[in-house]
Image: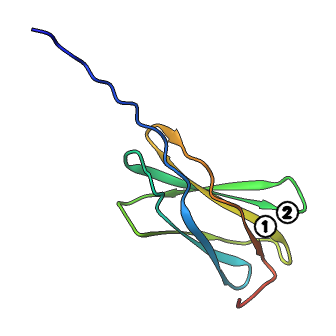
Amino acid sequence: MHLFHLCLSVGVPTSPLSVEATVSCPYHWLLSWGSPTVTNGGITHFEVEWMDVSSDNSSLLQVPVFGPSAVYEAELKELSPETEYYVRVRAHNRNGAGKFSDCLLINSGMCGT
């Protein structure tokens, strides 16, 4: 009798899809995005990164996952007035972090668009 052990390597998720931002004044943005095409297992959380375009200052926000969803959301609060930010999102699973989404450019001075 032979015993075979098959070990499958599970990778990290692909990039989240359709990252969008909706402004809620003053200086708050609601981000939304779709699940990655390939999750390679369950998503444990998402990471949102935003960076002031005019400086090297960046911030990270971990967004927990409470089960499968078609759309995920996070709110960016207390952004500096009249400031442009690059925003991107990535998914994590038990194997680590996937690739970031494409950068989205938002302007905290744009209200109601």
Residue 71, percent across and down?
46, 70
Q: Is residue 90 left or right of residue 5?
A: right
Q: Nearer the viewer, residue 18 or 76?
A: 18
Q: Quadrant of residue 75?
A: bottom right
Looking at the image, the residue that sits furthest to the top is: 1
Which disc, if any, is residue 98? none
Pointer 1 residue:
85
Extreme-bottom residue of the structure: 112
**Seen from this angle, which residue lies furthest left?**
1
Disc 1 marks which amino acid?
A: Tyr
Say if 2 sits above or below 10 in the image.
Answer: above
In the rendered image, residue 67, in percent from the top left (x then y), is placed at: 35, 60
Q: Are marks 1 and 2 in contact (CB under 8 Å)?
A: yes
Whichever of labels 1 and 2 marks the residue nearer the N terminus, that label is: 2
For the rendered model, the colour scheme is rainbow
Q: Is residue 76 above or below residue 58?
A: below
Which residue appears at 67% of the width and 71% of the height? 77
How many marks on residues?
Answer: 2
Q: Secondary structure at mark 2?
A: loop
Question: From what the image shows, is residue 93 above or below residue 18?
Answer: above
Q: Quadrant of residue 20?
A: bottom right
Q: Of 84 and 34, which appears nearest the observer?
A: 34
Q: CA distance from mark 1 to mark 2?
A: 5 Å
Residue on which the image places disc 2: 53
Identify the amino acid type marked 2.
Answer: Val
